[in-house]
Amino acid sequence: MNREEFLLELRKNLNGLPKDEIENRIEFYSEMISDRVEDGLTEEEAINDIGGVDGVIKDIAKEIPLTKLVKEKIKPKRSLYIWEIVLIFLGFPIWFPILLTITILAFVMYFILWILDLVFTIVGTSLFASGLMSLLVFFIFLFKGDLSLDYIGYTFVLLGVSLFMFVGVYYFTKLAAFVTKKTLIGIKSWFIRGKK
């Protein structure tokens, strides 16, 4: 893919951005390709180095706030015809509940992911606190002259399980953050691409 093909494809895929933003991005990436060509790369190598159209769209999605993309997406490109308004009004009992259900399900899944993370964190913290209390009880019985090894066993079990819980919570939190970030970038990329 040469520079012209890349820039043409990029322009098509940035349809969801404001016109001035599209022109700024096209100019920016054109200069970026020129700089890399001056450094000795071919146009194709420069484009691969940039990351291709999909890579550029993901980079742009990371930068631009979602609110700006939504405003551009819902801004009317033309006025609606009367028959379109009538269809929207008559179809409201069908399309609105479907849209509302999909939106609520997406938010519920997102919240369940983070609530599970919170629950695992609370359980791990409770186990750790229980292990410390078990150790304290062991020392209290030890100073009273009653040597009860049960409590030291409870301590090791509870602290060991809490350690495993914290390791699991760490990786689960990283996974939840990764899924959240990728989902947001995917949504923003969809808005950036706009209609083809």
Image (spheres, rainbow, N blue to C red):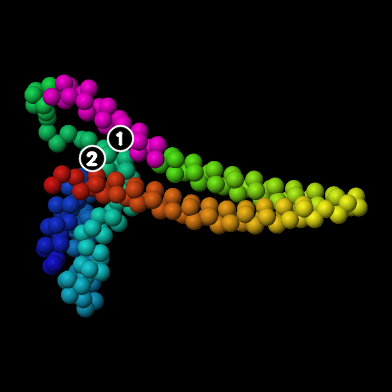
Q: Secondary structure at mark 1?
A: helix
**Residue 76 lies in the magenta stretch:** no
**Magenta range:** 87-109
Left of 54 or right of it: where is 119? right
* Residue corresponding to mark 2: 72
The x and y percentages for residue 193 are: 20, 48
User: Which quarter of the rendering shows the N terminus?
Assistant: bottom left
- Residue name at image x 27 percent, y 43 percent: 69
Q: Nearer the viewer, mark 2 or mark 1?
A: 1
Q: Nearer the viewer, residue 112 or 178?
A: 112
Q: Nearer the viewer, residue 29 or 180?
A: 180
The x and y percentages for residue 36 are: 23, 72
Left of 132 or right of it: where is 108? left
Relative to 169, say whether 37 is above or below. Answer: below
Q: Main secondary structure of the magenta part?
A: helix
* Residue corresponding to mark 1: 102
Q: Secondary structure at mark 2?
A: helix
